[in-house]
Image: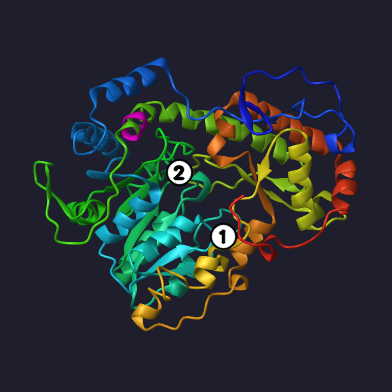
Amino acid sequence: MLTRNNVSGLESLPPSAPERRLAVDGGSPVVPGNYLLHARWPRLTPGDVDGLVAVLRSGMLTEMSGRSYVQSFENDISAWIGSRYALSTNGGTAALHCALAGLGVEAGDEVIVPAMSYIACAAAVLHQQAIPIFADVDPVTYNLTPATVADRITDRTKVIMAVHLHGLPADLAELRALAERHGIALLEDFSQAVGARYDGRLVGSIGDAGAASLMAGKNLPSAGEAGVLVTSERTVRNRAATLKTFSETIGVDGSYAPLHATAGYNYRANILSLVHASQQLFRLDDYTRTRQESAARLDAVLHDFPGLAPPTVPPGRTHAYHMYRFSIDPAAAGLSISVDQAREGLRQVFWAEGLPLVEFQNMPLPGHPLLQRQVGYGRGCPWSCQGRSDTPERVEDFPGALTAIRSSLVVGYPARAALASDDVTDHYVRCFEKVRENLRSFERFSAGLPSEAPWTQPARLF
């Protein structure tokens, strides 16, 4: 999809001019005409549309009237992922919150969270009146390191939250062994990694529970917003259900009944979102292969680009490439600019060519205002409510996250699925090649940019 001034709908590109100079140096951009190139996501077939229209016409648009649609989705995804149970929710944060409740997390308990992830991971812990404790990430894989997790475990630790960031599985064998050694639970956030595998098994099915966002921009997209919890432990699923909807209980036959024994929330999913996610599930493997093939093409061009490196995929893991994050080292390319100038230079050069490069977080999670001010849900709770006087953590204490943030960028907007489109990937390959052919021009342009660490600015997502 092309957009001009953020208005979408144009479906074809004008022919590219045979110009070799960078657009920032007066050349013609890879994507002419002041357009930004995006993939169309999610993909809808005529059958998808017909199925959604049939649901609309049925009038069964809530979980109360459309329970059969809910059960169908939950059966589909649990069978596909290899778990015994699934519980649908209205979003990924709700799924994480329900999973924490299902795993027995209570007020004042501690949950270990990666220092580099989406804010929802920490927010879900606070929703359960628990305390997020941050562990550092590997600056190469961007995932939790078992060694830093081990350093943060206390007698209050209840759960390790392993986030499979960008689609690459975390070190589940080590994290699982660590959790078992300390008698705590392992929760997988596989929002960005639906379809990724660890030692042949789909992520989400390996920990004590898994939770994922299925919003429209994810690898497994819904028609808007949705989430899912998966587990093979019935007690975990049932405890999670009591939080999901005003303390509903689930009978042995799968029937639901109101109990009203706990406060509960209202995390019911939109039926149209679940139906669409079920439709997309049957094409997910094809989409994942397309992303992996696109990643291989980008890998090839970056292997030949001094100073840039593709994502690392350790043995025994498959990457689902919700995001393609590459690393930047200007010194390795023989450039006399700082890594901050190189990062910002690449971002501006690609945007001028009509192809977005973006950050994903400019600051470790502990540096976000929610955690620095310890706002929680009012009057300093849950910290103050548990008689704690924790000093807010310093971002400097998470060198892995800082290195990752400072020296990498992401290809395309994550919710626009750049790697799911061969055409979009073609254009990124051409742009990387163009920059490689104009390294000195790129160096001159970047040398005029400020050199400052990203986390010196207010926290942002992109």
Please tell me how crowded label 1 is: few (under 14), some (14-19), or many (20+) other residues with Cα within 10 Å: some
* Residue type at numbered disc 1: Asp
| Prevailing SS of the magenta stretch | helix
Q: Residue at x 35, y 52 (%)?
A: 94
> What residue sits right under mark 1 in the picture?
138
Q: Quadrant of residue 421?
A: top right
Direction from residue 188 to residue 30 in the image, left or right: right
Direction from residue 401 to residue 173 in the image, left or right: left
Direction from residue 391 to residue 128 in the image, left or right: left
> Magenta residues?
273-277
Give whichever of 50, 356 is nearer the camera.
50
Q: Residue at x 51, y 56 (%)?
A: 117
* Residue type at numbered disc 2: Ala
Q: Position of residue 80 (x, y in %)?
A: 30, 35
Total labels: the figure holds 2
Judge whether residue 331 is colored magenta: no
**Image mark for residue 193:** 2
State the SS at label 1. Answer: loop
Q: Nearer the viewer, mark 2 or mark 1?
A: 2
Q: Position of residue 17 (x, y in %)?
A: 83, 21
